[in-house]
Amino acid sequence: MGLPFEFYAIDRYFFPSLPDGIQRDDAVIVIDYFGSNRLVVNKLIDQLDASLIIDATQAFLNAAPDDVLFNSTRKFFGVPDGAYL
């Protein structure tokens, strides 16, 4: 049982070039590159009608608590198993 997915390109400012026809029940995963992508993420939150999931594994300290995101504490702290959703 696989989920359908599509890859998308990003421009030099890390803004995604999303395909047309994204529906309300779709989900889009966006990477917050090193926490510097927060403006792009905020813009997408305002623009998208779909669910936005933020990959914050490279931006642990910049992740807002009200976002839907996943992260890993193993990259920042000395813990043996530190992923959380």
Image: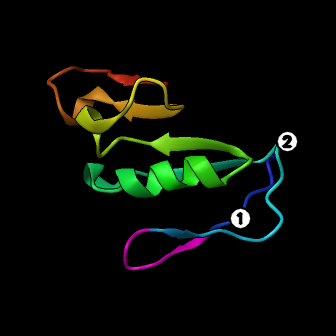
Q: Assign the N terminus to one quadrant of the image.
A: top right
Magenta residues span 8-14
Q: Which mark is residue 6?
A: 1
Type of secondary structure dominating the magenta stretch = loop
Q: How many C-alpha atoms fall within 10 Å of the one at disc 1: few (<14), some, or many (≥20)?
A: few
Q: Residue at x 37, y 73 (%)?
A: 13
Q: Which residue is mark 2?
A: 1
Kind of element beneath mark 1: loop
CA–CA distance in space, label 1 to label 2 = 16 Å
Q: Label 2 neighbourhood size at 10 Å, few (<14), some (14-19), many (20+)?
A: few
> Where's residue 58, x and y in %?
29, 46
Q: Is residue 36 left or right of residue 1?
A: left
Badge 2 amino acid: Met
Question: Residue 18 — which label?
Answer: none
Label 2, secondary structure: give it.
Answer: loop
Q: From the viewer's side, name the closer residue of 49 and 9.
A: 49
Magenta span has 18?
no
Say which residue appears at 67% left-offset and 52% top-offset: 48
In the image, residue 28 sits, relative to residue 73, either above or below, namely below
Looking at the image, which residue is at 14% across and 24% down? 78
User: Eyeballing the image, is 9 above or below 36?
Assistant: below
Q: Position of residue 17 (x, y in %)?
A: 59, 73
Tell me residue 16's x, y (percent).
Answer: 54, 68
Label 1 is placed on what type of residue? Glu
- Picture layout, residue 84 above or below residue 58: above
